């Protein structure tokens, strides 16, 4: 079970993201630097207890209209081989020392635990409190199983999100640009699963919507 440490990070997560977000094709902020606020999210546990896994929501008020972004992150005590392109930066943790912070869509540990969450094999955990499930995160899956799809840690960004394709045609679609939607809003017609959650908007009100959608490809 992941332990939440009450300690310092230098630089902070928001400082790292302020430098990194403008390089993403799905970022649509203003001409200046992002003006970021942590607005929600959840954590997942690494069964081996080595990798921190966080799905962070940040809001950016630098543009003409405030925007919310989903940023999956992993925190590692050593570099992840072959993932230099996904490195957001390094930070000094007051308890754990140097941590390598990655865009988690390229990290196989995060991908595996996201599949487990979608299938209901693990629970989303509170972002700020140890050993506490996050009951606001919802999920569903009506397919035959995702673990056998053979997802590589390959992520393709576009102007709205990130696609994680599997060889059999199954795909995870992460909604990087968040769109508020009612709790009872239908899933896309081709969806076989989802993860949804909540976040705070810049005016202090709550919002909720889809974080991840699953499309299951042909089998056999």
Image (cartoon, rainbow, N blue to C red):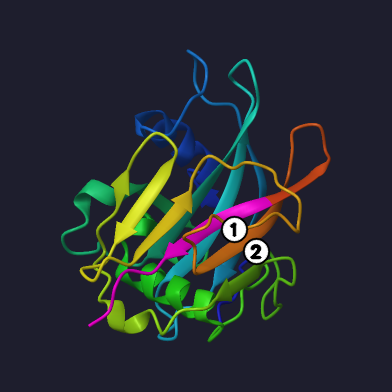
Foreground pick, 62 / 10? 62
Label 1 to label 2, Cα distance in Å? 25 Å
Is residue 110 left or right of 121 when viewed as pictured? left
Secondary structure category for the residue under label 1: loop
- Looking at the image, is mark 1 or mark 2 nearer the viewer? 1
Q: Which mark is residue 129?
A: none
Mark earlier in primary sequence (1, 2): 2
From the viewer's perspective, is 205 left or right of 137?
right
Q: Quadrant of residue 81?
A: bottom left
80 relative to 46, above or below: above
Q: Secondary structure at mark 2?
A: loop
Residue 6: x and y, percent?
65, 63
Q: Is residue 214 magenta?
A: yes
Q: Which residues are magenta?
A: 209-220
Please give left or right for residue 137 compared with residue 73 in the image.
right
Give the crowd class for mark 2: few <14, some 14-19, many >=20 residues within 10 Å.
some
Task: Kindly identify which residue carries mark 2.
Answer: 127
Horizontal and vertical percent position of residue 128: 68, 64
Residue 71 colored in magenta in the image: no
């Amino acid at each position: 079970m992941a332990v939440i440490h009450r300690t310092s990070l230098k630089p902070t997560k928001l400082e790292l993201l302020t430098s990194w977000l403008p390089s993403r094709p799905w970022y649509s902020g203003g001409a200046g630097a992002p003006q970021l606020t942590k607005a929600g999210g959840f954590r997942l546990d690494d069964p081996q207890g080595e990798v921190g896994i966080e799905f962070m929501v940040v809001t950016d008020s630098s543009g003409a209209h405030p925007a919310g972004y989903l940023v999956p992150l992993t925190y590692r005590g050593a570099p992840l081989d072959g993932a230099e392109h996904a490195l957001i930066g390094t930070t000094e943790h007051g308890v754990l020392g140097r941590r390598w912070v990655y865009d988690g869509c390229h990290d196989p540990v995060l991908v595996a635990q996201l599949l487990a969450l979608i299938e209901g094999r693990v629970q989303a955990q509170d972002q700020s409190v140890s050993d506490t499930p996050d009951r606001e995160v919802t999920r569903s899956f009506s397919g035959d199983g995702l673990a056998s799809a053979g997802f590589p840690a390959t992520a393709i960004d576009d102007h709205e999100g990130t696609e994680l394709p599997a060889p059999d045609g199954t795909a995870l679609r992460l909604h990087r640009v968040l769109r508020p939607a009612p709790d009872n809003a239908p899933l896309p017609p081709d969806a076989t699963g989802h993860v949804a959650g909540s976040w705070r908007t810049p005016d202090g009100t709550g919002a909720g919507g889809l974080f991840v959608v699953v499309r299951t490809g042909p089998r056999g």
